[in-house]
Image (spheres, helix red, strand yellow):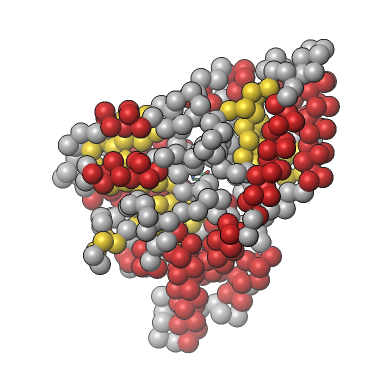
Amino acid sequence: PIYLDYNATTPCDEAVLEAMLPYFCTTFGNAASMFGLHGWNAYQAVEQARAQLAHSIGGQPKEIVFTSGATESNNLGIRGVFRACKNKGKHIITSSIEHPSILMTLKDLECKGARISYIDPLPDGSFDIERLKELITNETILITVMYANNELGTINPIHEIAAIAQKNDILFMSDATQALGKIHIDLQQCPIDILTCSAHKIYGPKGVGALYLRNQQGKRVVDLLPQITGGGSEQGMRGGTLNVPGIVGFGKAAEIACLALKNGELERIAQQRNKLEQELSILNNVQINGCTDSRLPHVSNISFKNTDGKKLLSMLKKSISVSTGSACSSSSLSPSHVLAAIGLPDDLAQATIRFSLGKKTTDQEIDFTLAEVKRVLRMTAPHLSYE
Ligand code: PLP
């Protein structure tokens, strides 16, 4: 089948795999045991990866903490701030269309005394900046808003949010898991305090992520309390022996992603996405979700009205891998919280597809997808609905 689900995960780049391989059997040392050459070589490799990742986002190597993925990074960022700032306040502001790793963590903190304000998106999925300004209080310790939404692909006004947070002396965290490698991120230009990301969304290995924590005048903006305790690795913020091959792969993937942003690859993918979207949107009963002015180049979220959504998707999945309803956890059949938040009724949410393209997507695959979607629509919708 054709793969158009690059927001769920990406295939590991061959060059990434090649960079990782020596660190399984040959340079297998423990990066924390630097007295012997084995450990020293592993340590050097981790530090190179730290520099590669830092460079790709305009940060410094010492501002990077490696984790097991964006889920863990989001937990570390939110729980770490909540525990570190409890003397200042317990109020956190977020958006209602964050990834579950943010929303579920915040729900858990609610049980521990946090007060959370959720900002609903505007109907086109964009961020309601006026609402943010209204919600800030003296008790607010953290604003956490994703860089780009995984289901709609909409990009949030991160610079504006960061400036508001900075003016009010509130920490600002952004989940950049879907933005890294797709749009230019420069933390020198944008005062984000905490940024989280994951290797497997940028053609790196699964099970590796990172958290960026800003240093100001040589000092961390906040001392995150570790969530995984044990040992002093990652500057005491995350215990455990480092996943050296995974981290090396993440560094290489970040370096390649940086080049891809400069060499026109994303423009090519955007053209394919636009073709797919344009040819489908001329049909009746098709609706594109999410503001198209500020969107990731490779994502299209499309609803098909007046058709049997479940049938449509079960027929389509034989030939094309895409996401439906909820993205990262499509195993749950309940309609996506993101689509509900932008006002889609349940039945329309069920008949919604997220296409996410990537560097291996070919023009032929887009042509095939168009033909296949139209063929399946003819079989699942009443006569002439999609003419
Ligand atoms: N945040 C966003 C926006 C995502 O899309 C994902 C995807 O799964 C995650 C966090 C979780 O990342 P990971 O799989 O590295 O835990």
Q: Position of residue 75 (x, y in %)?
A: 39, 47
| Residue at the image point whose x is 19% and y is 40% from the top | 89
Q: Position of residue 383 (x, y in %)?
A: 82, 12
Question: Hey, which quadrant is residue 157 in on the image?
Answer: top left
Q: Position of residue 300 (x, y in %)?
A: 63, 35
Q: Position of residue 358 (x, y in %)?
A: 67, 49
| Residue at the image point whose x is 72% and y is 37% from the top | 275
Comparing 220 with 243, the one in front is 220
54 to 273, vertically: above or below: below
| Residue at the image point whose x is 77% and y is 49% from the top | 362
* Left or right: 89 as drawn, with respect to 100: left
Tell me if I can see residue 106 in this picture: yes
| Residue at the image point whose x is 22% and y is 42% from the top | 168
313 to 274, vertically: above or below: above
Comparing 190 with 18, the one in front is 190
* Left or right: 170 as drawn, with respect to 299: left
User: Which image quadrant: the N terminus?
Assistant: top right
* Left or right: 138 as drawn, with respect to 284: left
User: Which image quadrant: the C terminus?
Assistant: top right
Question: Hey, which quadrant is residue 213 in on the image?
Answer: bottom left
